[in-house]
Amino acid sequence: MLSKQKIFTLGFQQVLAMYAGAVIVPLIIGKELGLTPQQMAYLIAADLFTSGLATLLQVYGGRYIGSGLPVMLGCTFTAVGPIIAVSLSAGNSLTTAYGAIIVSGIFVFLFAPLFGKLLRFFPTVVTGSVVTIIGLSLIPVAMKNAAGGEGSASFGSPTNLLLAFLTLLLILLFNRFFTGFIRSVAVLIGLVTGTMIAFFLGMVDFSHVWTASWISIVQPFYFGTPRFDIMAILTMIIVNIISMVESTGVYFAVGKVTDTKIDSKTVVKGLRAEGLAITMGGVFNAFPYTAFSQNVGLLSLTGIKGREAIMGAGVILVTLGMLPKLAALTTVIPDAVLGGAMIAMFGMVVASGINILSSVDLSKNENLLIAACSIAVGLGSAVVPQMFDQLPGMAKMIMQNGIVTGSLTAIVLNICLARKDKAVKNASQTASETVSV
């Protein structure tokens, strides 16, 4: 049994390992949608608070909800692009995105038992293609921020570019020359150091930190009553199905580290907890939540295989979420510094998709076509959405969302080409049997 001091220390380490990932999502979305510092502070506080609740829900492991595994839940990066796109299409309003998040969370909860059957529509080639599309569609966001933020008077200035480069360089250096815990918080170190350099250059304003309150309680529907849009809901459901695939992989990874047998019941309970966490994210105006793979490495590093440290981390996150002044502190990070970190993090999403595709046999023509066409269609829709401006309203909304078009292309091609391939094999087998007779 661990002492309270050790639980706090190990829990705080787990928080640090995922803090950069937890904070950077609301920072990116808030910057892109032009939220005020007060709104940004709330967004970050709500994210930390809900992430803590979601983690405790997952770790607790009840009869029907929660895997009981030492798994931390945090906001998924795959939702960044879709949330921004949905909000911008709805007139720069987050209420449509939150309506979609709530419904998609209910979907995940209800369909968790049927997930095994749904997996056949998301084989490795489809999942890898979609993750790659998501990463590629986010790269322009990273580059615009690295230049100082779109619309900024100093956009593309040498100072902004240097700050972005130094932030990225620090992240790379810490990943190259350090291991374990230091490497796991390389992004956080890069953000802090880059902001300190920007402070000495007179680019950091702490006025909003001083005016922020010390204690605040997260409230439901802070940004307004959620609105429900079919296309937005479809987009978030696709995002969360991908997250379900990723989380299932994390469950098995944690099971391997902790010598725990993972069965279908454990997976279903874990996904139900995620569905409930996603719905809570929509209610409290936070984000969709998924199992954080970066914390699995810390389980191996510390050798602590119990749930106490993760439960401690959940309590710490809930506490941090009730301290708006601390949340406001993260809003002082300049766009250029954030952009430098985005390049690494979004690049990792692309690399993750490529890594998934590396396990696919691309020498098979059907797999090659699925990956090539879905990535091309998805990226094309994301980069040149104006090409669909003359289409009717609903069709325009579908086609301008690269995540949706790329995902649907991959799914449809997989169904059609896989069936064709199976038919060819059956025909060949039949012909062979006929000849042998």
Image (cartoon, rainbow, N blue to C red):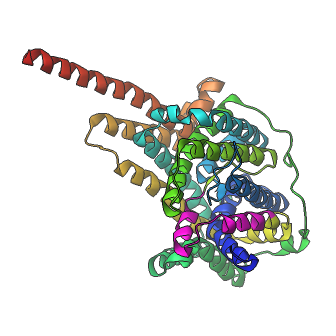
Q: Which corner quadrant holds the N terminus?
A: bottom right
Q: Residue furthest bottom?
A: 200
Residue extending farthest left: 436
Q: Main secondary structure of the magenta part?
A: helix
Vertical position of residue 213 compared to residue 43: above or below: below
Residue 284 x/y as whole percent: 81, 49
Visible residue check, residue 105: yes
| Residue drawn 72% across the image and 44% down it | 276
Whether residue 310 is in magenta: the answer is yes
**x and y percent of residue 162 in the render?**
56, 76
Does the magenta portion include 5?
no
Q: Nearer the viewer, residue 302 or 323?
A: 302
316 vs 167, nearest the viewer: 316
* Percent coordinates x, y for residue 322 in the rendering: 85, 64
Q: Quadrant of residue 315?
A: bottom right
Q: Position of residue 275 (x, y in %)?
A: 68, 42
Please indicate, yes or no, whether residue 389 appears anywhere in the rendered image: no
Instruction: Residue at 65%, 38% (x, y): give it.
Output: 108
For the magenta stretch, what is the residue range? 292-318
Where the C terminus falls, by quadrant? top left
Identify whether 148 is placed above or below 363: below
Residue at 57% in and 37% down: 386
Residue 407 vertical position relative to residue 133 in the rendered view, above or below? above
Q: How many dots with numbers? A: 0
Left or right of residue 318: residue 398: left
Relative side of 110 to 377, left or right: right
In the image, taking residue 58 as reference, residue 239 lies left or right, namely left
Residue at 49% across, 60% down: 348
Front-lying residue, 305 or 23: 305
